[in-house]
Image: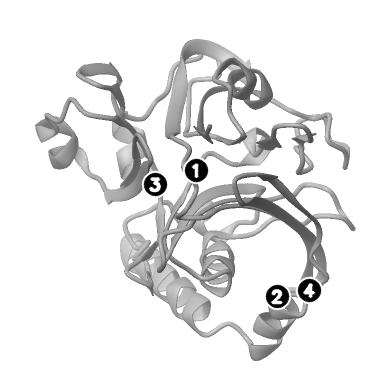
Amino acid sequence: MKHLITTLLLILATTLCQAQSAQDSILIANAKWHSETNIANGITHRSAQIVGLYGSVQSINVVEIPRSHRGHYGIAGGKGMLTTSTQATDNNAQAAINGTYYNMRAGNSVCFYKVGGEVIDSTSVSEFRSRVNGAVRTHKRKLQILKWNKSIEQGYRSKRGTVLASGPLLLEGGRTSDWSACDEGFILSRHPRSAVLLTRRGDVLFLTVDGRSKGNADGMSIPELAFLARQLGAVEGINLDGGGSTTLWMRGAGVVNYPSDNRRYDHAGERKVSNIIYVR
């Protein structure tokens, strides 16, 4: 019975995501986006604080890397816990976002992480059970979002590029993903969130939603995040580690969102994380 109730709640959450109010769509479309900056080869940054979105206050930052960008995507990690900004600088990045879930004591990823032919970390049983059903793959000028599960992970043999598992998936082929197999509390509660999105024309979006700052940033549930992703033009999307890990960095500007690890609404609350996704 408990499993049935959980499944019904998550189906309801998916339905709500697909049928958010027209007012929410209007608020996103008419938001006063500001600080738009062309930092390199067409990469742009937009930010907005939207009052009333989902009946809350939302602080949103988006870095958009156009398909025409000639840089390379990468995933960095495996060196213990370092801030997103430190790892981005070390990898000569133009923009970077924090990566996937990790062990905060040991510093290693608790999700599959493979660089070329070397498997550095594997996905834990608990992550597969609660939220991990996707992965990000980078190889030269390409970034892909993949479906992922235990069977795929065990059979993954490619030695090209880098793969980092995470989840849950937000959008698949323009449709809202199914979260019925994920942890209900994680899906429905509001937190700071990080995501990587792909648009139909092949642009890549690094998206952060801040939270845990009453009156400034309330955070989003997974259905709310997926709805926002669709409104931003995404057709594929994957959720990354959020909470205090949520960080978006740009060369020349530093941290552009409002990380919550210091419990202040400023740019100084950056947490050390296990890995990042970046473009250079």
Give the labeled residue for mark 1: 240
Give the labeled residue for mark 4: 31
Question: Which one is closest to the eye, mark 4 or mark 3?
Answer: 4
Q: Mark 3 and mark 2 in contact (Cβ < 8 Å)? A: no
Coloring scheme of the render? one colour
Q: CA distance from mark 2 to mark 3?
A: 27 Å
Q: Earlier in the sequence, mark 1 or mark 3?
A: 3
Give the labeled residue for mark 2: 28
Q: How many marks?
A: 4
Judge by depth and name the residue closer to the eye, 249 or 191.
249
On the image, which quarter does residue 220 sit in? Answer: bottom right
* Type of amino acid under label 3: Arg
Q: Earlier in the sequence, mark 4 or mark 3?
A: 4
- Residue at point 79%, 30% (across, down): 269
Q: CA distance from mark 1 to mark 4?
A: 24 Å
Question: Which one is closest to the eye, mark 1 or mark 4?
Answer: 4
Callout 4: 10 Å neighbours few (<14), some, many (20+)?
Answer: some
Judge by depth and name the residue closer to the eye, 242 or 160.
160
